[in-house]
Amino acid sequence: MSKSFYNHINHEIDQILSDDLYKNERFINSPQQTEVKLKDGKEVMNFCANDYLGLANNKDIKDAAANSIHEDGFGMASVRFICGTNDLHRKLEKKLSSFLGFEDCILYVACFDANGGLFEPLFDHEDAIISDSLNHASLIDGIRLCKAKRYRYKHSDMQDLEKCLQQADDDLTNHKVIVTDGVFSMDGTFAKLDKIVELAQKYDALVMLDDCHATGFIGENGRGTAEYFGLEGKIDILSSTLGKALGGASGGFICAKENVIKLLKQKSRPYLFSNALSPSIVSASIKALDIIKEEPKRRERLKENTSYFRKEMKSLGFVIKGDMHPITPVMLGDAKTAQSMSKMLLEDGLYAIGFFYPVVPKGEARIRLQITSEHTKKQLDKAIEIFGKVGKELKVI
């Protein structure tokens, strides 16, 4: 046992605490929905879940999961290539690829694993990966595992992206891939996908899109950022999640051409060395896709709620970052202020979490709110009222 190691760990924790950057976990004793019960029994409005379409506690989805447990068991107890592939896995892969307009799909236990296992099998030291500076941590980690040359362009800066593409050509790289989030999760902003695709075509590069915060609810039919920009069929590789709008459990996936998926199933380490996704989650996700197709009013309500809430919050004097997306960051700057606001909001019945370094850059602390289709007008108005009260008490408006 090394005392110096544990002393080092304690010092790290103490430093995080002294910098007001320590993240405390709160406990929920109810299903995930717009109103949740805390450990102490207090019921509060929830404005920070990824449950964009309100499917996390949907009865039809819960029934699909429960029926699958009875019919298919609790887990597969195997990786896919040994004895872990159920008919449901291929059914969902085909359903996802068809819905999103790709040839094929591969399932992972999480999108973090999907992104982590994507790049190393497909790109080598002669290739170039060109990544937005604010891409999700899973993309960053996945790229680090790959031997390809790495280039990073300033966030959504198309001139800098073009410079990186030119540099990759000057470096005589073989294949080039531009990697971007579709929607940046901390800011609620869209990638400039139209410009990215244009540059990709100009420089003969692939486009890889992480669409976790868009799949199921962005675009006319919920097909995500590419549909929103009218660019379906222009994306080479797409990763996304089952853990947000599609029921909120777990699971991730990659969609691409059939030969790309075939190679990933042979070489992607998180796929080869992780148990198959539980059949109950797979079955529930299939049902979620059906609901998304059959109930477009959920997307309509979400769009209306988002527009109304953003407008009213801005009218109070809050600085709201992002585009017209359900992710609604209330910018505060100071980490301590963000933590204080989160506590005061909770005391008044509103569950919302402060985000600060290292999740966001230093000096850009915020309360990140997420609107859902199931928030009522009464809940939205009450949240706005609480924010107005707390904002004045903290002198941020």
Image: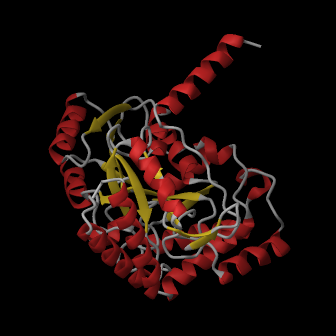
Q: Nearer the viewer, residue 240 or 93?
A: 240
- Total numbered badges shown on the rendered structure: 0
Above/below status of 144 relative to 115: above
The residue at the point 29 percent across, 32 percent down is 173
**Residue 106 as seen in the image, left or right of residue 239:** right
How far across and down, in percent of the image, does residue 175 sit? 33, 40
Residue at 69% across / 69% down in the picture? 30
Quarter-of-image position of residue 56: bottom right
Image quarter hosting the N terminus: top right
> In the image as oriented, which residue stretches furthest toward the front?
393
Instruction: Determine if residue 263 is in view.
Output: no
- Report which quarter residue 68 is drawn in: bottom right
Where residue 217 sits: x, y (%)?
43, 74
Q: Position of residue 258 (x, y in %)?
A: 50, 59
**Residue closer to the observer: 202 or 181:** 181
Residue at x-position 66% and y-position 56%? 27
Residue 158 lies, with reference to residue 30, above or below; the image says above
Identify the residue shown where x is 55% and y is 74%.
34
Quadrant for the C terminus, please. bottom left
Residue placed most toward the observer, 5 or 148: 5
User: Of residues 165 and 109, which is closer to you in this image?
Assistant: 109
Relative placement, left or right, of 82 versus 172 is right
Residue 16, position as x, y percentages in the image: 51, 31
Query: Within the image, what quadrant is residue 188 found in?
Result: bottom left
* Colouring style: secondary structure
Instruction: Work out whether residue 291 can be spotted.
Output: yes
Does 133 sit above or below residue 197? above
